[in-house]
Image (cartoon, rainbow, N blue to C red):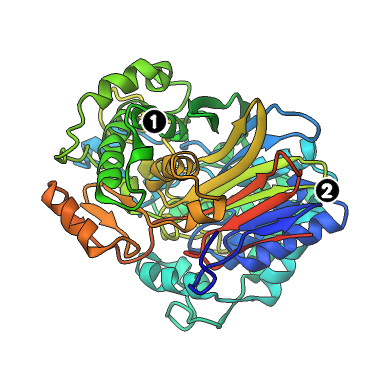
Amino acid sequence: MRDYQLPGRSAVFAQNGLCATSHPLAAKVAVETLEAGGNAVDAAIAGAVLLGICEPQMTGIGGDCFVLLKPAGEERIVALNGSGRAPAGLSAAEMRGRGLTAVPPHGPEAVTVPGAVDAFCRLSQDWGKLGLSRVLAPAIRYADEGVPVAPRVAFDWAASAGVLQGDARDFYLLDGKAPAIGQTFRAPRQAEVLRKIAAEGRAGFYEGAVAEDMVASLRALGGSHTVEDFAATECSYGEPVRGTYRDIELVEHPPNGQGAAAILLLNILAQFDLASMDPFGAERAHIEAEAAKLAYDARNRFVADPAHMTRLDHMLSVETAQKLAALIDPKRAMADPAPLSEAVHRDTIYITVVDRDRMAVSLIYSVFHAFGSGLASSRYGINFQNRGAGFTLTEGHPNEAGPGKRPMHTIIPGMLCRDGKVMMPFGVMGGAYQANGHARFVTNLTDFGLDPQGAIDAPRSFAVGGEGMEVERGYSDAVRAKLAEMGHDVRIPSGPIGGAQAILIDPETGVLVGASDPRKDGCALGY
């Protein structure tokens, strides 16, 4: 139990339905969708699409999503991959021929075809109750009327406004500047696009005027994209990957997401007695950092489009984790793995919803870096993601950039199970940090007995990405000094590390318990 004399927030308890996400308007809209007779899928789509208006630096319809779904009355978990593919004209050899060693993160080469809209349409058709017209109505209204910019959103917007180029500056700046707290952001052109999707389904986005606008804009910037690339976009169902830590099963989305790295990281940590350590001390932070370096090195080597990945079983193997754990010096830091371009970003939204029938949705949705590529379509202002920056240009690598391929993704929705039953959909935002964040959340729950809200509130550190070891101010100066003595290049990050949301389905009472990260503007709401 938290100390009520200190700043903090209580978990949210509800019986009929609950949403936890990073902006209060999206949480409100999701709960209203449930109250109107919608299910968790309807509510999650309604909230997620609205988040593209509330937090446009984090996400939007020019991005990708991944979903884990537990159907009502069942304990199985379905994975839906809503990540788009590289255009047919993308060539790693051509980029190497220009002297490039990485995909330019703010060029048209990094723009993969947006996959989220197709996934939302498929989810609505296969699992929803209300239909797209009703589900998209709140986002359409807010896009037309505008949303006051929230404090964390304004902080991020100001930090990333410099990446916006060309038409994107007209759509995402106010008088040439990032909007301040409380200023109203409107996106009436996006409202037009959402109306087309509501009326025509995926064809309203991937065909006709909207697709033509996106293709013409990208080709004018030097991209190879075609209307055929957009028309061919299709999400895909798959089987989740799973790992066990203590008495909890962690369920992750399969590749091309980095969920396997979270399982590998937990398998490495299982070789150490974390429960005997101070949860907020240097020893635990050091062991986690070293385990993360090894898990992320494996991720960088192996995770790719599933059609090109061959080492998934190796990453999930406990034997692999045991061998890697033996490389960790409990007293001394090792070097970071080679960084990837994705390591610098922290921009994603996550939403989770559980309804009265206990359908559970864990959905993550992003444009990758802040404002993605920094580019937007000229007519409708659709901000293009830069997921192609997650590719490598190393010849022969499974994640080598190539036509029609899905790049390695950082965004990973999660679910936790106990005794074969889903107990908690959850997600941790923050780019590269997400796999580490999943592992920390699980160990906070299991080894240190924190409740979901406490596990989210607890201070974070992260030592992967070639930027030193970031240690939040929630840690003491003494801990930072000890980590520096152990060889870590310690620094306090300019902003918080990630964000998180979770909903516990209490196995004893059946009550829903929502937890929401104070590092974001959002909240958990139920009814």
Left or right of 231? Residue 88 is: left
User: How crowded is the residue under tag 1: few (<14 C-alpha within 10 Å), some, or many (20+)?
Assistant: many
**Between 151 and 149, the one nearer to me in the picture:** 151
Which mark is drawn over residue 379?
A: none
Residue sitting at 69 percent across and 49 percent down? 353
Badge 2 element? loop
Q: Residue at x 77, y 41 (%)?
A: 358
Nearest the viewer among 401 and 451 is 451
Residue 214 seen in this snapshot: yes
Residue tagged 1: 402
Q: Earlier in the sequence, mark 1 or mark 2?
A: 2
Q: Residue at x 19, y 51 (%)?
A: 483
Q: Which residue is mark 2?
A: 131
Task: Please say whether residue 64 is visible from this viewpoint.
Answer: no
Q: Amino acid at mark 1?
A: Gly
What residue is at 29 percent from the left and 35 percent from the top? 291
Splitting the image into 4 quarters, where does residue 492 fall? bottom left
How dense is the environment of label 2, judged by Cα within 10 Å: few (below 14), some, or many (20 and up)? some
Q: Quadrant of the N terminus?
A: bottom right
Q: Quadrant of residue 30?
A: bottom right
Q: Left of 294 or right of it: where is 122?
A: right
Is the C-beta separation of discs 1 and 2 under 8 Å? no
Q: Amino acid at mark 2?
A: Gly
Disc 1 secondary structure class: loop
Where does the C terminus fall, quadrant-wise? bottom right
The image shows residue 496 at horizontal and vertical percentages of: 38, 62
